[in-house]
Image (cartoon, rainbow, N blue to C red):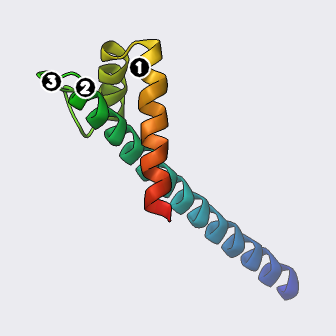
Amino acid sequence: MSTRTDLATLHTRVACVQAECALWQIRRQWEYLLATTKGAAKLVQERNPGTSPESSSSRDDLLAYILSNVSEKQADTVVRELASKNQKRMR
């Protein structure tokens, strides 16, 4: 019986560690997404002087700002420029 309890405890601990790792990965992905969105908003702001997002810390506000100030053609250009900048950073 004690072996079963030990295995159950070990299984619970492993599950907790896996959950912590998953949360850490999600947090890193969220931070990257927010940083990428901030970069895109900055490019849009450079192209549209005198405009700015309501909040630079809220992803929803940044996306709303980008969508309200960018045409479809401009969006493609912004995405390409941002991807190019990110590739340069990774080198």
Query: Helix or strand or loop: what does disc 2 sit on?
Result: helix
Q: Residues within 10 Å of mark 2 (few under 14, many from 20)?
A: some
Q: Residues within 10 Å of mark 3 (few under 14, many from 20)?
A: few
Given the image, on which type of amino acid does mark 1 rest?
Answer: Gln
Q: Residue at 22% across / 31% down in the picture?
A: 46
Given the image, on which type of amino acid does mark 2 rest?
Answer: Arg
Marks 1 and 3, Cα distance to the nearest angstrom?
A: 15 Å
Mark linked to residue 49 = 3
Q: Residue at 31% across / 30% down in the picture?
A: 62
Q: Nearer the viewer, residue 27 or 33?
A: 33
Residue 77 in the figure: left or right of residue 53: right
Image marks 1 and 2: residues in contact by CB distance under 8 Å: yes
- The disc, 1 or 3, on the residue closer to the chain's N-terminal end is 3
Given the image, on which type of amino acid does mark 3 rest?
Answer: Pro
Pointer 2 residue: 47
Marks 1 and 2, Cα distance to the nearest angstrom?
A: 9 Å
Image marks 1 and 3: residues in contact by CB distance under 8 Å: no
- The disc, 1 or 2, on the residue closer to the chain's N-terminal end is 2
